[in-house]
Image (cartoon, grey):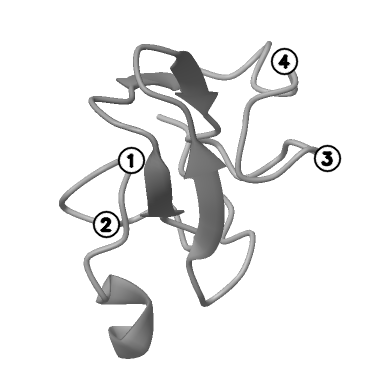
Amino acid sequence: MTYPVCAQKAPYPTEVEEGKSYYWCACGLSKKQPLCDGSHKGTDIAPIKYTATRTQKVYFCGCKVSVNKPLCDGTHAKI
């Protein structure tokens, strides 16, 4: 089993648009954090699709271990 890499110990504030889908990097290897750039290929980790229900700022998880993936739940404060 492959474990994700902690990209950063803080969330990524990101502006999202209502109805648009985003693919959150779950592996921590993407160079386009917090979104997927395909770097997970060769691992058993896949990106998580997030579809915005409204236009707003959301906080995508940076540590990659949030229970509320793909959004930050504060878990980074405990690692």
Residue 42 spot, x, y in % from top left: 67, 12
Labels 3 and 2: the sequence-earlier one: 3
Which residue appears at 42% of the width and 56% of the height? 61
Instruction: Kindly indicate whether the residue at mark 3 contacts the one at mark 4 (C-beta within 8 angstroms).
Output: no
Residue 19 spot, x, y in % from top left: 35, 12
Q: Mark 4 belongs to which amino acid?
A: Gly
| Residue bearing the label numbered 3 | 31
Labels 4 and 3: the sequence-earlier one: 3
Residue 53 spot, x, y in % from top left: 23, 25
Please tell me which residue lies in front, 29 or 59: 59
| Residue bearing the label numbered 1 | 70
| Residue bearing the label numbered 4 | 38
Q: CA distance from mark 4 to mark 3?
A: 9 Å
Locate residue 53 relative to residue 56 in the image: left or right.
left
Residue 4 spot, x, y in % from top left: 50, 45
Please tell me which residue lies in front, 55 or 38: 55
Which residue appears at 53% of the width and 45% of the height? 15
Instruction: Kindly indicate whether the residue at mark 2 contacts the one at mark 1 (C-beta within 8 angstroms).
Output: yes
Locate residue 18 relative to residue 23 in the image: left or right.
left
